[in-house]
Each structure stands twice: as C-alpha cells, then as structure tokens.
Image (cartoon, rainbow, N blue to C red):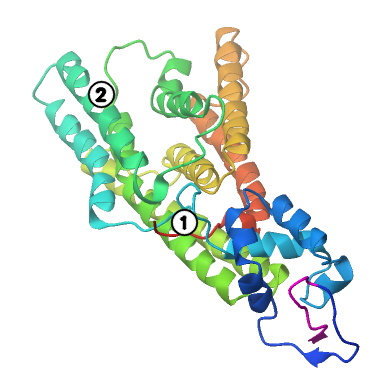
Amino acid sequence: MSHARVGETGTSRSGPRRRGPADPVRSLMHRHRQLCAEAVDPLEIVAGLEAQGVTDRVAGGFRHRDVFTLAEELYARVPRAATPPAAGGPTGRPALLLTLVPGAVCAAASGALRVLPAVTVVAVAVPLLLLALLAALRRGPLRAPYGTGPGGAVWSCWLVGFGLCGPSVLDGFAGGVLPSEATAELTALALGLAPAAWCAHRFAVRSRGHLLRSRSLEEFGGAVRPMLAGTLALFLGCVLALLYAARAVAGAPFEPAAPAGPAALALLLFTARLLAVHGQPDPAAIVTGIACAGEAVALAAALLDRLPLPPAAVPGAACGAAALALAAHALATLSRATAHPAPAAPR
C-alpha cells in the first residue's frame, strides 16, 4: 500500500506517492517519539498529531482509518518515561517462587489438621496465608498496578469463603471444622497461583511480541483473541489437574463433576486478575460482585427453603456464569493495543 510522504509537520509535501515500508507506522513513531513518550493517554497523541496537520486522510496512508486508531498504536508501541510497570512485565525467580508459598502453607495446614486442634491450625495458617498471598500478588506478573477496582478484594474473599463453606452451610452443615474435601480444594486453589502467574506472564510476553510484529490493530486483535482463549483454557486445565490430585490425596471418592465449582471459581478469579493487571479493574470488580450477589441470594433462598439448585451446584453456577461473562469482556478489551503498554524506559 502506498502512502503520502509525511514531513516534520505530518502533512503531505508532494503529489507523487511512494510505496510504503512493511511497517509504515515505524517512521512516524520515531518522528514523534517525544510526543508519544510524554503522553498519558492516546487522546494526547491525537491532539498533538492533529496540531501538526495529521488528518484522517494522512492516517489512511499509515493503514489506519483515522487519527484515533493511529494514536492508539503509537501510544502502545512507544515506551514512556514514567508509567506504571507494564502488565506482566519482567518476572524473575523470586517472584515466581513467591507464588508457591500460599500452596505450601495450605498443604502444611492440611497435614497439621490431622494431628492438631483445628482452632490452633486456623489461627496460625490464616495469617500466614494472607501474608503469602499479599506478597505474591504485589510482585511479578500478577501485580495489578491500577488496583483491583471497588470492592475487588472483598468480593474475591467472599467467593473463596463461599466456595469452601457455602455448600455445607446451604446443606445445613453446622460443625466448626472444614471438611477434608474443602481443605483439599483450598490447597489446590492456592497451588493454582503458580500456574496463574506463569500463564499471565506468558500471555503478556506473547501479546507484546504480536504488537511489535503486527501491521495494524485488526491484525493484532486477531492474533491476541485466540491466544487469550488458549491462556484461559490452559489455566483451567492446570487447576482441574490440581483439584483432582488434591482430592485423591485427601482420600475423597472420584467424582468427575466434583471440581466444577472450585474450577469455575479459579477461572473467574484468574480472568478478573488478568483484567486488573492489564488496566481493566473496574469491570472485573463489577462482575465478581454480581457473582457474590448471586450467592447471597442463594443463601436467602435456602433460609426460605426455596433454593432451586442443589447446594453443591450454587458456587459453580454463580462463578461459572460470571467467568463466561468476564471472559467475553476480556476477549474484547485485551485484544486492544492500549491494554499492552510498552515497558517504562529505564532511568
């Protein structure tokens, strides 16, 4: 495709047109590097380009339908000097090792429950687990530099607690000790933090690679959507394997559908975290909050003896529906170039 030669002002200087390079945006990216590096969002680049005479017609020469999509690609491809760390940025061995600690704490607590009073084990294990989770989520590929949205942490804690105890409460379980299957599921979910970090890092690195190679936003989105779907499927497979293994170690009978609820919960939390990592915390918080509301309605229905589902199916239904909705949103938003900003330039 040919395009008009663009000078320092971004306007066409000559009538004859030349055949453009394989990556026509690269020359414009270098010419306006300072503008792009100092912009806090693509709209600032739009204003700067238009002030220098770059119109939608000129943007067409760079294989974009208008200045806005051209600015979006420039914003994503040019590193900025002072931005939050890029989603899924460099991850070292210490960060990955931290994701193994919560699973180790849960595994140790499960073993201790067999020989020590449950109250003692819970009093020691819960603070350690919370500290390990905070450490793992504040570094590495699961770090969310834009936060988790309004109530995001609260909704996550509710979903985990309901996933472990909700079915027993709905079914009239009144004891003070978690059943062995619930502790096994908690251990599997905690161990799932490590594959979650690996999948998030893999997705971030590969999407950044596609962004640098793609010649248009449409080409980039077409490459990222199946990759994101594969990432979610890969994580779900890892979690299912951990859940089946944990149930086998706990001596629970083999039931193919038994891990459905915890697996749906894990997929929902992973998708929500992936959105938060890539700058979309609010939709993640809203959908997880809706899932919590659905589980609260189930509790109220159980009190009125009007629960339409088996108690064990409630977490899976609520989290499964929310996970599908959030995955659909992620396929739309994480296929945009602005969800994958360039790493900050070294100082």
Between residues 283 and 121, which one lies in front from this camera angle?
Answer: 283
Residue beneath disc 2: 126
Badge 2 density bin: few <14, some 14–19, many ≥20, Cα 10 Å: some
Residue at left 86%, top 66%?
Answer: 55
Residue depicted at 45% across the width and 64% down the height: 205
Give how far across and how far down residue 169 sits, in percent: 43, 16
Farthest residue in the top direction? 304
Q: Residue at x 77, y 54 (%)?
A: 47
Q: Amino acid at mark 1?
A: Ala
Can you tell which quarter of the image residue 29 is in?
bottom right
Residue at 65% across, 72% down: 31
Query: How many residues crowd mark 1 within 10 Å: few (<14), some (14–19), many (20+)?
Result: some
Label 1 SS: loop
User: What type of secondary structure mainly makes up the magenta span?
Assistant: loop
User: Is 196 contained in the magenta span?
Assistant: no
Q: In this picture, which residue range is highlighted in magenta?
A: 1-10
